[in-house]
Amino acid sequence: MSAPGIRAGQDAEDLDVEEVLALVNHRSRPARPASPDHGPASTGTPASPASPSRATGATPAPAPAPRPPERHRPATPWADARAIAGRAGRAPAARRAPDSVALQDALGLVLAAPLTALTDLPSFDTSAMDGWAVAGPGPWTVRGDGVLAGHTEAARLVDGEAVRIATGARIPPDTTAVLRSEHGRTDEQGRLHAGRDVQHGQDIRPRGQECRSGEQLLPDGTVVTPAVLGLAAAAGYDTVAVTPRPRVEVYVLGDELLTEGRPHDGLIRDALGPMLPPWLRSLGAEVVSLRRIGDDADALHRALTGSTADLIVTTGGTAAGPVDHVHPTLERMGADLLVDGVDVRPGHPMLLARLQPDRHLVGLPGNPLAAVSGLLTLAEPLLRALGRRPAPEPYGLPLRESVHGHPRDTRLVPVVLRGDHAVPLRYQGPAMLRGIATADALAVVPPGGTRAGQETELLDLPWTTAGVGSCFT
């Protein structure tokens, strides 16, 4: 399903941000109201003398009062909205300079330059096992000294000679092989005998076996895992060049929100303030602040214009109610609306705006599950692109039960994964968190619904694949 105004067969991925913006702005113009007979809209000017009402002597009807302009923007299809958010993060103006960070600070970031070996690995011939370094055929006379890892090179061996050696130690010159401890025995005269045939080069790791100096080990764009840290250290690195985490501020809007205690007197607990910062960190963001602004248009404007974050995430205020200040504030700032409403349930009134070429805002609905929908629809692909993280491979599983669909919109439904099926959860309402709190993923249910056994696209939640402790690094 393509976005309104996009030619048939043209995928939204083929449009750059400026083209999408032009389409959004074109669709944003309010339609002129049609006359009762479906003709052109009235201009409000009096009828001319030749008009039928004057010709018949009838009293002309008064001109209708001018209507205020309607804020009606066709919503963006769900898949197109995700593609637009990803493209916004890949725009040249949104790219940030790489950082050079110590290895202990690089975990979870993305390499901004290829990792090239600074030395041969290993950088000298080493023993792969504990045992004896031997020269020539056996039996061998064992020298009294031994060779340990981290020590200088041992004296050269001559044929018929052996020396004790530890794993990782430098191989003495002219060594034929390493005889493992469990494969050798000594006789009463102290001579070493092999319990099996000894092959030339056996259990010796030759210099450069893994790589040579200057060889590319990993390309840029690689996520830094613990194993990557180990490889970088082995290859001689103290620091690596990485793409910095996008800096994010979270603004919680609404006068009805409590930060502690039980709901009372029309006030409710703020569920998004505790939930969004760790969720955003799990998506690769550096959350620099959480601010509670309430329903104050001027305070929101001051906060937005004073922020230097790469992304601002707001909660609530994205609809058209009397205290929904996000749209008017963005208009006041001259921001570009890239996505204004998405054909998805819950979360329909979410939005994505470009505040400056390198700064964006994602407006989430105030209902908790609707906010999660907005987070995964707009914030996740934007943050992934800003952090240069690779997109996950799409996948799906059959649903164990049928799921009712919206007639026109995509639905995001919490599910748990059980073997080779996904099981839809109850408590799917836009204000509910009980379902998502136990979910493994969200099922992407197309318009019209999904029948039992039908394979459905799934969006994994970050902690289901990496574990709760590791995904918030």
Image (tube, helix red, strand yellow):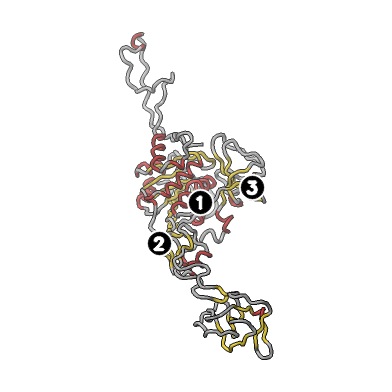
User: Callout 3, which amino acid?
Assistant: Ala
> For the residue labelled by badge 3, is the local secondary structure a helix, a strand or a loop?
strand
Residue at 56 percent across and 88 percent down: it is: 145
The disc at residue 99 is 2
User: Callout 1, which amino acid?
Assistant: Ala
Mark 1–mark 2 Cα distance, whole angstroms, equals 22 Å
Q: Nearer the viewer, residue 317 or 377?
A: 377
> From the viewer's perspective, is 275 left or right of 330?
right
Number of numbered discs: 3
Residue labelled with disc 3: 422
Is residue 383 placed above or below 430 in the rendered structure? below
> Mark 2 or mark 1, which is nearer the start of the sequence?
2
Residue labelled with disc 1: 391
> For the residue labelled by badge 2, is the local secondary structure a helix, a strand or a loop?
strand
* Residue 237 image position (x, y, % from top left): 45, 69
The residue carrying pointer 1 sits among few (fewer than 14), some (14 to 19) or many (20 or more) residues within 10 Å by Cα, namely few
Residue at 66 percent across and 76 percent down: it is: 197
User: Callout 2, which amino acid?
Assistant: Asp
> For the residue labelled by badge 1, is the local secondary structure a helix, a strand or a loop?
loop
The residue carrying pointer 2 sits among few (fewer than 14), some (14 to 19) or many (20 or more) residues within 10 Å by Cα, namely some
Mark 2–mark 3 Cα distance, whole angstroms, equals 41 Å
Residue lying at the far bottom of the rendered structure? 189
Residue lying at the far top of the rendered structure? 56
> Mark 3 or mark 2, which is nearer the start of the sequence?
2
The disc at residue 167 is none
Q: Is residue 135 visible?
A: yes
